[in-house]
Amino acid sequence: MHRLSWTIPISTHFNRALLGFDRFLFEHSSRVCRLAVHLGEALDVDGHDLAILALSARLHDVGKMAIPGGILNHPGPLDDAETTIMRSHSVQGERLVRSQCDIPFGDEVATIVRHHHEHWDGSGYPDGLRRQATPFLARIVAVADSWDALLSPRPYHPGCPASEVLHILRSERGFKHDPGIVDVFIEKIVPFLGDS
């Protein structure tokens, strides 16, 4: 697969801050960026939009730097109040991105960061957007994010094997995720991922 240059200017402040804040978050964001770019290419996203997609995926969880560590790394289910705080990370991320003048395509990136947890059926957050009301690039980031988050062990859940993640992703097709994007991910991206 063609690889976008990873030298696209990204806020040095955010890059260092993510790494210093939480190494897992930094590595997760790097993996989601690579997956989103490959998926974007498979969906014929190119040029300006592919650069926006790469930056948005890289920064999709930057708002988690505003979430207390006790909630971010809580070993088990969160209560309602903690869930509300955790879910605020997409809005916090949008605010952080908009506050930085050195991020290329800042408004577009901020919008995608805000909406990467919207669901196809309207059950997501922060705005409960449905279907095409959610920006297309945010829907791509959502699929890449789900894949990597489910594979990766965290204090609140063990990592799942790729076969189980694939089953979950198929089951979320059409209610959590855009079915067309899931289909392309399964057909054109998953075969190249091996047993990650």
Image (cartoon, rainbow, N blue to C red):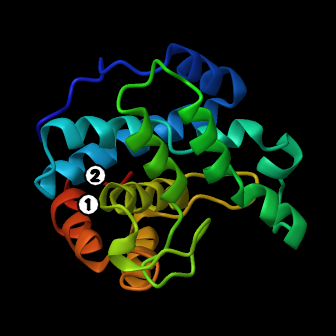
The answer to whether mark 1 and mark 2 are in CB contact below 8 A is yes
* Looking at the image, residue 41 lies above or below residue 77: above
* Looking at the image, residue 36 lies above or below residue 119: above
Tell me if residue 176 can be seen. Answer: yes
Side of 17 where 179 appears, left or right: left
> Hey, which quadrant is residue 127 in on the image?
bottom right
SS for callout 1: helix
Q: Residue at x 61, y 23 (%)?
A: 19
- The residue closer to the viewer here, 191 or 117, is 117
Numbered circle sitting on residue 190: 1
SS for callout 2: loop
Q: Amino acid at mark 2?
A: Leu
* Looking at the image, residue 99 lies above or below residue 186: above
Q: Position of residue 164 (x, y in %)?
A: 45, 73
Q: Position of residue 89 (x, y in %)?
A: 68, 50
Q: Residue at x 37, y 40 (%)?
A: 33
Q: Amino acid at mark 1?
A: Val
Side of 167 where 42 appears, left or right: left
Side of 187 where 7 appears, left or right: right
Q: How many marks?
A: 2
Task: Residue under label 2, please give it.
Answer: 193
Q: Position of residue 43 (x, y in %)?
A: 15, 58
